[in-house]
Image (cartoon, grey):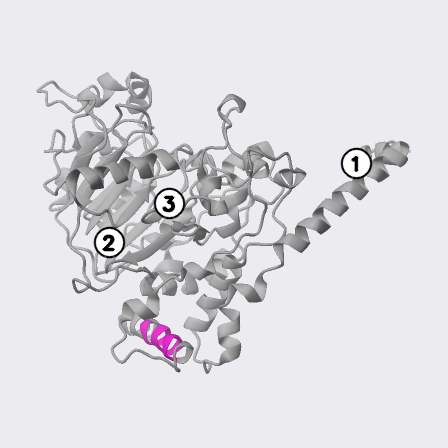
Amino acid sequence: MKIAIEGCCHGEIETIYNSIINIEKVTGTKVDLLLCCGDYEALRNLHDLKSLAVKPKYKTMGSFYKYYSGELKAPMLTLVIGGNHESSNHFSEINNGGWLCENIYFMGRSNVVQFGGIRIGGLSGIFKEYDYQKGYFETKPFSDDHLRSVYHIRELDIFKFMQITDPTLEIIISHDWPMGIIDYGDRNSLLRYKKGLIEDSEKGELGNPATMATLKHLKPKFWFSAHLHAKFAALVEHENNENNENKENNPTTTTTTTTNTESSNNNNNNNNNNPTTSPTNKTNEPSIEKTNTNKANTNEFTRFLGLDKVLPNRDFLQVLEFEQKVPIGEPLKLCYDPQWILIQSKTKHISETYNSPTKKPLDPELFSNLYTNEEVKKVEDRFKEIYKFKNKDNLKENFTIQDALEIKKENFVKNTYCYNPNSNSPLSNLPPAFDNPQNKIYDNLIKIITQDTEITNETLKELDVSTYSGNLEELQKEQLNQRNNNRLQQQQNPQQQQYQDDSEIILDD
């Protein structure tokens, strides 16, 4: 199967799909999956645009709203992670992952899913040391500062991710690059092409130390990133790890089939010069390498590829061929990963109180020996049990585990107005009419999957988005009426409104 990987999107979703369609026409092949490595900018309306963490001059609607409205449909399944330029309001609705629209799935803060039987991990956001050991303290409506801090990666995201065991992850996608990754490729060419990276490189601040620790521990076959707006390839060897941490000028070519939509910038030319700076470890990696005592992953190397942003003649897209792990001819489905579901369940008590606005380092021992293989098997069996009950009237004789684990596209539901460039509707400026039900569905799934309770029709209701969805049209009318009433009251009682505005001022007695 063929998987396309894209760097920074910046709202150019339609352009990306058109590029892939062109590749398919030229090569006579079919792309099965698209991975987007952040700065996606999934803007549904002007309310989302207001929460976009970019400078005002860069605030544009992009093209996502066309897919949210149904005017356009993503031509292939698309997995998205968050970067540092996102609609914080939108992505925070589904922190554990969920459908953004038909065929486009957001992986949340951190997630592991399966497609075609291969395991794909995603880590959203970027690393900021001052927020890394804080909790998820931001609440809506977000302040200007919280619009940005909300996408800073947290220690809990990494600690959970590090508990993944065999079978190894085939792919991990992140927005920023693992710290030190440039020392495993042609760093000189990169720094000549992107001179603005030299200072951070010399300070030891280029990249994410937490994801480099993750890369070395999990040893995925491939790691893809964006953020730095440059194409860069590297090879990290894992055999004799301690002797290879400072290895430089490794081969940077990928042996799998590749296709680019734009001409190369040639910013990875080979050279025999010494590195601009020697590898540095000024920022300590998180001390989490030993938190998981289960069987270690055994890949000998990880191939890294950083990609550019969507612009003409830039390397923002790569197509690779992967061997699917399900029988040829069987439909390729997006599925929950049983291990990840179990990890989410085992750490739920931590997540529920993880809201400190100050640094509170987590205890690695809380994550040691988190689960057993028997528990993973029990989760798989529980998914099968739900599937059989749900389809009891027309159950396939030989249904597969992929059938049982499938993440249903029906879980998507519109909960807010969609932008219309030909309309000035005030609804475009209003927040969602009701909470995104996918969060509730996910919480219920975690609970049901890890319990021994009987599966009943009531169970299925707890996993049905319609149970927690509102009538969007009616709720929007109520929103407009409330908005108009508030404005009328402000006009009729200007002094009262002034009093409300000043109510937080503390006056001396």
Q: Is the magenta stretch mostly helix, strand or loop?
A: helix
**What label sits on residue 80 in the rendered view?**
3
Percent x, y of residue 26:
18, 37
Tell me which numbered mark, 3 or 2, is placed earlier along the sequence.
3
* Three-letter code, disc 2: Leu
Q: How far apart are marks 1 and 3 (CA)?
A: 41 Å
Q: Residues within 10 Å of mark 2 (few under 14, many from 20)?
A: many
Which numbered circle lies on residue 504? 1
Quadrant position of residue 5: top left
- Residue 70 location, x and y as percent? 47, 47
Q: Distance between the residues labelled 1 and 2?
A: 52 Å
Above/below status of 82 relative to 94: above
386 magenta-colored = yes
Q: Are marks 1 and 3 in contact (CB under 8 Å)?
A: no
- As drawn, is 145 to the left or to the right of 276? right
Q: Check disc 2 and report the residue beneath it.
A: 169
The residue sitting at 41% across, 46% down in the picture is 155
250 with respect to 211 (left or right): left
| Image vertical order of residue 150 relative to residue 290, above or below | above
For the residues labelled 3 and 2, the Cα–Cα distance comes to 17 Å
Whether residue 126 appears in magenta in the rendering, the answer is no
Residue 508 image-quadrant placement: top right
Q: Which of 488 and 148 is in front in this view?
A: 488
Query: Which span of residues is magenta-colored?
Result: 380-388
Label 1 packing within 10 angstroms: few (<14), some (14-19), many (20+): few
Label 1 vs label 3, nearer the camera:
3
At label 1, the amino acid type is: Glu
Residue drawn 25% across the image and 62% down it: 331
